[in-house]
Each structure stands twice: as structure tokens, then as C-alpha cells.
Amino acid sequence: MWGGRYAEGPSAIMAEINASIGFDRKMWRQDIRGSLAHARMLAQVGIITAEDLAAIERGLEQIGQDIAAGNFAFDSTLEDIHLNIEARLTERIGEAGKRLHTGRSRNDQVATDMRLWVRDAMDGLAGQIEDCMRAFVGVAAAHTATLMPGFTHLQPAQPTTLGHHMMAYVEMLSRDLSRMRDARNRLNECPLGAAALCGTGFPIDRHATAAALGFAGPTRNSLDSVASRDFALEFLAACAICATHLSRFAEELVIWTNPSFGFVKLGDGMTTGSSIMPQKRNPDAAELVRGKTGRINGALVGLLTVMKGLALTYAKDMQEDKEGVFDAAESLALCLAATAAMLRDMKPNLNRMAEAAGAGFSTATDLADWLVRELKMPFRDAHHVTGRLVAQAEAMGVDLAGLTLREMQAVEPRMTESVFGVLTPAASAASRTSFGGTAPVNVAMMVQYWQEKLA
Ligand code: ARG
């Protein structure tokens, strides 16, 4: 394809390090789409004839069918997907195939193919993020008032509800979704026609190819067009953040399914057993969501590192953008599917969660707030008095509601019987009616808000 000035072919190691066909064959659909748009434009502006176009269209369609059917022998001496398809085209249709590359280069071709691939991946992942949001909302809808402990530092903090906890992830995923959509908008300009780096003297119509490929328009600078991969970086960043959210939930599932917590149970279909310990029910899917996040985050750092030292414009280093992007997209798709499946499978243990919601003096803040409200005590003083009551209860081996009024009055003489009304986890949760708070009425409102948005 480029051997005109060469007397000898590449050495074996040159060929091996150079070839990307082993992984960029994944972009065959995008490569054919791009070539069809380019050829149609070439015919439209009179650079190739209508007969050439007809032959190219027929040839590319046939090649597409062959690849889809597994009847295409990829040739690693042809380096990459672009040369593989072009060589086969010329083999099939002759002369006309050799005219396809007029006014373009593999540099703008690969940039176009990658944008198309990433755009398709973004659309697929956006749909999956929405599905995962629906799964979280589904659990939340059934558990707006199901008590569970809210944690900070993984220590009991204040009672919350399972519904509120689930809806926290809905908010995170909604931002992941909007990050995907933002990145898609910025990605959606077409580099095709930037050619090698400086554009071309042929009277090509870049607006036509951009429109044919569903881009908002052509990119405005040919050097930038072939040199930039920030669309891939943004995609990877969006993937990494989303995976990080899923990984946190996965970590929670690992904790919650541990019998010492026993908050939820995953069924036979979403756990695995041990070949030696018959009692085991391991949350492998959750662990793998957590684990795969490592490779997704790694792909982002990998490509940032590839790009950071490249003088404009194209350099072969950029061929290293592909495996990380493909792998991150596929891994995130799996993580989203597995998370949605675990959500739809998991059975919360309401008693265990309610019991835990009241443990660890989780209503101490409610007691302090009561002192502020009823006795007009400054909050800092109330915090101190409550701390003394907690210490007292702890020494006696009871929870706060287990202290008698007389024992409380020994610490603060103005305490009254009404304090016991704020010491239950249910009362605590119900009282937190500030916008975005834990109160079941709030959670029900947010569930409805998202159900309507996701409908
Ligand atoms: N396989 C190459 C890549 O992925 C295509 C572009 C090759 N361009 C070049 N000037 N050798 O980057």
C-alpha cells in the first residue's frame, strides 16, 4: 500500500509492532460506513465516476457481509482494518477500488472511525445507564420507608432508608449519563477530509460527508482533526467515573451480603459457591464490578499518558488509543448489566437492617436536636450533654432509649419524657424532611420524580 519507495518489505518485528488489525478489526462497520460516505461524496463532486461509485458500493457491501459472516481472512501484513478492507476492495473490483483513497488519508480515516465507534458505544452505554437507574429506582420505590443505618467512616451515623440510599446512586448515574451526552456532543464533528494533516486540494465536500455520517458538521482545523483524541479521553473519563460509582455500590454489596451484616441476600443466579467450603455464597459479580473498575480507570490514565508527549499532528503512538477504549466500553457495559441484575435479584433483610439502624447510638443527633429545640440549648452544649448520655448508656450496656428519665436527668435536669419520642430510628428518619433528606415522604417524592423522567 505504501511500498513505492521501498526495495524491501518490513522486518518481522517491524510488522509485528506495527500491526493493529488484531484489535482494530472491531471498527470494521465504522470503516465501511466512513468509506461509503467518502465514496458517495467523491462521486457527487465528480472526483470519481458513477460507475466507480457503484462498484465501490457493491464491493464494500460484500466485504461487510463477509466480515459479519466470519468469511474474511484478516491479513496482518496489511497492518490495520483500513488497509485490509481497501486491499480486499481492490481485489474484488479492481481499478475503482484504488480510487477510493483520493482526498483522504488513514489519519483522518482512523480519526473518523474511532469517533463513530465511540459514539456508538456512548449511545449503547447511555441506554444501559438508564436501565441501571431504573433498577435502582425500582428497589427504592419498594423501600422508601425501609430503615437502614446511614454510615460515615463505615460507622453507624444516622438512620436512613434503603430507598434513600438507592436514590443516591440514581443521582450519581444521572450525572454519568449527562457526562456521556456532553462528551457525545463535543465528539460529534467529522474529521474526514482533513486528509493526512493539511486538508486536500481536491474539491471535496466535507459538509456532505459529515452529514452522511450523522455528525453535526466537519471539524474546523485539519491539524487538530488528525492529532486529537480528547473525544476518547472524555469518553474514558466518563466511563471511569461511572465505573467508580458502580464500584462503590459493589463494595457495599460485598459488605451487605456478609452474614455479619446480613442486610441483603443475593440469589443462586447472582452468586457463586466454593469448591471446598460448602456453606459459601460469594458475591463474585459485585467483586468483579469493583475489580473491572481498575482496568477502566487504567485505560483513562493509559491514554492520557500516550497523548501527553505527542507533538502535532498524528503519531503512531495514537494507535494505542484503541484497546483501552474498546476494553473500557465493553467492561463498563458488563458492569452496568451486572449491577442492574444484582439489584433486581437482591432480597433485603428488613429486620437486620432495622436492627442495625438503631444500633451504635444512631439517634444521638436527634437527642441533641431535641435539647436545642425543647430546652433552647446552644447546639455545641447539646452535643456535649448528648455525649455524656451516650457514655452513660454505653457503660450500662443499653442504647439511648434504654436510659430512664431519671438517669437522663442526672446529666441534664430539664429533660422530659417527650425526649423518648425522638429516639427511635423511624422517628429520626421521618423527621429529616429538609429538601433532599431521608424522610420517607421525601424519598417517595424523588422516586416519583425519577420514575417520570425515566419513563
Ligand atoms: N492503524 C493506524 C492507527 O490506528 C491508522 C493510521 C495510520 N496512519 C499512518 N500515518 N501510518 O493509528
Image (tube, rainbow, N blue to C red):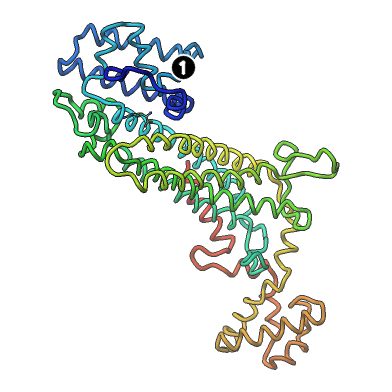
Indicate the position of residue 180 as horizontal and vertical percent values: 41, 44
Q: How many marks?
A: 1
Residue at 15 percent across and 15 percent down: it is: 46
Residue extending farthest to the front is 7
On the question of residue 123 being in view, the answer is no
Estimate the x, y position of residue 185 in percent, counting from the top left.
Answer: 32, 41
Query: Residue drawn at (66%, 41%), measured in percent from left and top?
Result: 285
Q: Nearer the viewer, residue 5 or 437?
A: 5
Residue under the point 63% across and 76% down: 366
SS at badge 1: loop
Could you tell me residue 340's position as x and y percent? 59, 41
Question: What crowding class fits label 1: few (fewer than 14 Cα within 10 Å), some (14-19), or many (20 or more)?
Answer: some
Seen from the viewer's position, the closer of residues 80 and 29 is: 80
Q: Is residue 211 left or right of residue 448?
A: left
Q: Quadrant of the N terminus?
A: top left
In the rendered view, would you say 307 is above or below 109? below
Identify the residue at image location x=48%, y=13%: 73
Residue 393's place in the image compared with 278, above or below, is below
Residue 103: x %, y % from top left? 21, 23
The residue closer to the viewer here, 273 or 345, is 273
Query: Which quarter of the figure has residue 426?
Result: bottom right
**Ligand 1 falls in quadrant:** top left
Q: Is residue 200 visible?
A: yes
Residue 284, image quadrant? top right
Q: Which residue is mark 1?
A: 74
